[in-house]
Image: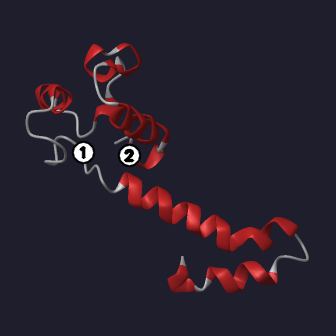
Amino acid sequence: MSTYAFDKIALEFVDLEPAFQHYTEFEKVLEGFFKILSICPGCFAGGGDPSCPIRECCKQRAYTICTECFEMDTCEKIKNTTLFQQCMIKALKAAPRLKL
């Protein structure tokens, strides 16, 4: 977005829509999401701990990433992960770009 100078374009729209005055903060939030979500390229793509039971399950089911599984909300493997992993999985599930 910075390549196309959206920060400057957003300022041009402040008079039409006051929310654009918060563009800089919005861009920082997007960068934060990118950093977090780029941690996980997907189990099938070689992401994560090689001995992770979730990764093994994804490979067996030919999923690129755990969020493709329709049983995700009731999965015991996911329930038995660390709090950080559960937060990552929640974030991945909420990210439509990663639902391949």
Q: Quadrant of the N terminus?
A: bottom right
SS under mark 2? helix
Amino acid under disc 1: Gly
- The residue under the point 33% across, 57% down is 38
Amino acid under disc 2: Leu
54 horizontally vs 22: left or right: left
Q: Quadrant of the C terminus?
A: top left
SS under mark 1? loop
- The residue under the point 15% across, 32% down is 52
Asked if disc 1 and disc 2 are in contact, CB closer than 8 Å, the reply is yes
Relative height, residue 80 to residue 31 (above, below): above
Judged from this view, the residue extending furthest toward the left is 51
Residue 58: image location, x then y, percent: 19, 30
Q: Dot 2, how many residues are within 10 Å of its Cα: few (below 14), some (14-19), or many (20+)? A: some
Residue 79 tag number: none
- Report the front residue among 37 and 5: 37
- The residue under the point 30% across, 54% down is 39
Residue 71: image location, x then y, percent: 34, 17
Judged from this view, the residue extending furthest toward the right is 15
93 horizontally vs 58: left or right: right
29 horizontally vs 77: left or right: right
Relative height, residue 40 to residue 57 (above, below): below
Q: Gap between marks 1 and 2, in whole Å?
A: 9 Å
According to the picture, the residue beneath numbered tag 1 turns out to be 42
Question: Mark 1 or mark 2: which comes first in sequence?
Answer: 1
Q: Dot 1, how many residues are within 10 Å of its Cα: few (below 14), some (14-19), or many (20+)? A: many
According to the picture, the residue beneath numbered tag 2 turns out to be 98
